[in-house]
Amino acid sequence: MANSCPDPDAWAWAPALQLWHLNRCWALECDIDPIILRARQLRHQGALPQASCVEQELLPLF
C-alpha cells in the first residue's frame, strides 16, 4: 500500500511523521476529538496548567 506508514513504532516517530500520521487519520475520518488533540498539544508544549483546564472539559458531569 503506497500510503501505509513506514514505521510501526509510533513512539519513536519524528514530529513530521507524527503529523503525516495524524493527517492520514483525518483522511480516514477517524473520530479524534479536537479537545483531546488540543490537550495533548498543550502537554507536549509544556503548558501543563492550560492542558489541565482543557482536560476538565472532558470530564463527565456526574
Image (cartoon, rainbow, N blue to C red):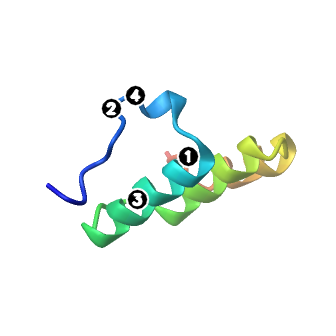
Q: Earlier in the sequence, mark 2 or mark 1?
A: 2
Q: Position of residue 4 (x, y in %)?
A: 24, 51
Q: Position of residue 31 (x, y in %)?
A: 32, 61
| Number of the label disc, if any, that sits on residue 32 | 3
Query: Could you tell me which secondary element the residue under label 3 belongs to?
Result: loop
Nearest to the eye among marks 2 and 1: give it: 2
User: Disc 4 versus disc 1: distance between alpha carbons?
Assistant: 30 Å
Percent from the top left, x then y, of residue 5?
A: 31, 47
Residue marked by disc 2: 8
Q: Are marks 4 and 2 in contact (CB under 8 Å)?
A: yes
Residue occupying image coordinates x 33% and y 32%: 8
Query: Any mark on residue 9, and which?
Result: 4
The residue that mark 1 highlights is 59
Q: Is residue 44 above or below residue 50?
A: above
Is any atom of residue 36 visible in this view?
Answer: no
User: What crowding class fits label 1: few (fewer than 14 Cα within 10 Å), some (14-19), or many (20 or more)?
Assistant: few
**Rendered residue at 34%/62% (across/down):** 24
User: From mark 2 to mark 1, how far is it between C-alphas?
Assistant: 31 Å
Element at label 2: loop
If you read the primary sequence from the N terminus, does the residue marked by circle 2 or circle 3 appear first? 2
- Horizontal arrangement in the rendering, residue 16 relative to residue 29 (left or right): right
- Relative to 1, is 47 on the left or the right? right
Three-letter code, disc 2: Pro
Q: Earlier in the sequence, mark 4 or mark 3?
A: 4
Which-is-in-front pick, marks 2 and 3?
2
Which amino acid, by three-letter code, is at mark 3?
Ile
Q: Are marks 4 and 1 in contact (CB under 8 Å)?
A: no
Please state which amino acid type lies under the numbered disc 4: Asp
